[in-house]
Amino acid sequence: MSFWRALLAIICPPLSVLGKGCGSILIVFLLTLAGWVPGVIAALIILNKK
């Protein structure tokens, strides 16, 4: 995970997981709507998966 991708995950979580698939975007988007912190955590976890 690059520095810029991590920074984007903190600023706007759904945009950071665009390359990971539709399901990931939807999950992160819904978690971001529920609260900013769960969206950021989910985005960082998805970005750290290989």
Image (cartoon, grey):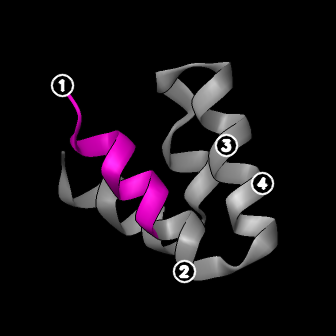
Mark 3: few/some/many CA within 10 Å (<14, 14-19, 20+): some
* Label 4: which secondary element: helix
Amino acid carrying mark 3 in the image: Ile
- Disc 1 or 2, which lies upstream in sequence? 2
Q: Are the residues at dot 2 and dot 3 in contact (C-beta closer than 8 Å)?
A: no
Q: Where is residue 5 in the image (x, y as percent from the top left)?
A: 34, 52
| Residue stretch in magenta | 41-50
Q: Check the image and report above or below for 35 versus 1.
A: below
The residue carrying mark 1 is: 50
- Disc 1 or 3, which lies upstream in sequence? 3
- Disc 1 or 4, which lies upstream in sequence? 4
Q: Based on the picture, tell me whether residue 27 belongs to the magenta stretch.
A: no
Q: In this view, does 15 lie to the left or right of 26?
A: left
The residue carrying mark 2 is: 37
Q: Are the residues at dot 3 and dot 4 in contact (C-beta closer than 8 Å)?
A: yes
Quadrant of residue 7 within the rendered picture: bottom left
Q: Is residue 31 left or right of residue 40?
A: right
Outermost residue to the top: 21
The residue carrying mark 3 is: 27
Q: Distance between the residues labelled 1 and 4?
A: 22 Å
The residue carrying mark 4 is: 30
The residue lying at 20 percent from left, 60 percent from top is 3
- Disc 2 or 4, which lies upstream in sequence? 4
- Disc 2 or 3, which lies upstream in sequence? 3
